[in-house]
Amino acid sequence: MTPVAVMVGANRIVQAAGIIHPLGSADLSPADEKTLRRRIVEQALQALRTEVVKPTVFTRE
Amino acid sequence: MALRVVCYVNQFFGQLGGEEKAGVGPHVVDGAVGAARAVQQALGDAGTVVATVICGDNYAAEHTDRAAAELVAVVAAARPDLVIAGPAFLAGRYGVACGALCAAVQAQLKIPAVTGMHAENPGVELYRRQVYVVPTGSEATRMLDEVKRLVALGLKLARGEAIGAPAAEGYFARGVTRNVVVEAAAADRAVAMLLDKLAGRPVASEVPRPAFPRVPAPRLIKTLEGATIALVTDGGLVPRGNPDGIEALNATRYGAYSIEGKSGLDAAQYDNPHRGYDTTWVKQDPNRLVPVDVARELEQSGAIGKLHETVYSTVGVATTLAHSARMGQEIAEKLRAAGVDAVILTST
């Protein structure tokens, strides 16, 4: 749903893991799922420290 | 029969003075004074300005409730058929006072009222849904022309005539949807619109797109190690039993839920009423929606200074822009008051 976030003008948008479980994945092992979640949160934290002047999507590294 | 009209003007347009008179309370002058004389001129034989009500901008802005009550009382005493406030152009306090008076007069006295102001006057957003607000320029350079438009709409209202669409009649859209019968089917109109667009002719959408104002993006200046981070979601996280009764769609409410002492979100304690996506997986593990478990670990490892102990949550599906903006503003104010530095909002 990142295009919607851009359209409404959210400034820092981190691409997460999907609509039905943005910060997880039922397909992964519990340990791998948590690693994924941690990576998305860490990316969001870095985004907060990043200067942006318009809606910006931070894609998966 | 000529209509009885009461005009409302501020201290400047009522010729009392400038800012030094902005604290003056309401008073009434018989007949048309100052800007109200333009109203009388525009009315011609159709009506008579029986009184001009004048109030200082600061008085109206600083004593909102008292000023409204006093102004409604003096307006009622003049027994008008129509109230015309302003126009206020780009003067913010004046515009808000005009909107407030028109709304109060309509609601309490059941007398039609109309005002006018510039699109960027804060009075437009505050009152356009309740009151007919005619667009004007930013300054009083074309006073009579603009007052004529206010008067024309006001006369229609006072006579109980049908009011057409905003663009046709010249007032700010009130957010009212009305059914109309048109000759051409939607497909024909859509093709005609496309052909106009291709030919470079002007095209007016029948469905105005909501405007999303650009919001400046402040950067987190503090280091993450010193910052308090809050988690917010529009993905529908609620405690079991949904104690705030957050709606499954079209939400008007949000909840504030403590995560104090929690190392993660326990599925047994949470539920999710959101009807805009399949919530099976986030109900299995609510950390998939609001990542309290990893945020807590990041707090404990010192990667972030503090995890805010309240999670704010609502349901974001078919939620109106107005309710979203209001809830966002209220949540932001609470977070700011609590000393939160930055927010991660998780969305589905």
Image: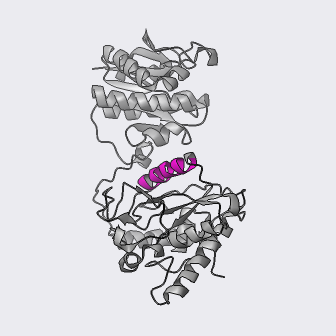
The range drawn in magenta is B323-336
Give the quarter of the image for residue B226: bottom right
The spot of residue B40 in percent (x, y) is 44, 20
- Measuring from the top left, give residue B290's x and y in whole percent: 48, 69
Residue A17 vertical position relative to residue B181 in the rendered view, above or below: below
Extreme residue in the top direction:
B30
Q: Is residue B92 left or right of residue B322?
A: right
Give yes or no for residue B320 being in the magenta stretch.
no
Instruction: Count the marks.
Output: 0
Indicate the quadrant where residue B179 lies: bottom left
Whether residue B226 appears in this view of the structure is: yes
Side of B189 relative to B62 (left or right)? left
Dominant secondary-structure state across the stretch colored magenta: helix
Q: Residue at x 54, y 68 (%)?
A: A5
Residue shown at the point (39%, 35%) measured from the top left:
B153
* Residue positioned 49% across, 27% down in the render: B86
Q: Is residue B291 visible?
A: no
Depth check: B168 or B207 in front? B207
Residue B206 placement: quadrant = bottom left
Expressed as whole percent of the image width and height from the top left, the position of residue B293 reads 52, 72
Q: Quadrant of the N terminus of chain B?
A: top left
- What colour scheme does the image use? one colour
| Image vertical order of residue B63 relative to residue A20, above or below | above
Residue B328: in magenta span: yes
Reply above or below: B88 against A56: above
**Image coords of residue A13 (percent x, y):** 60, 69
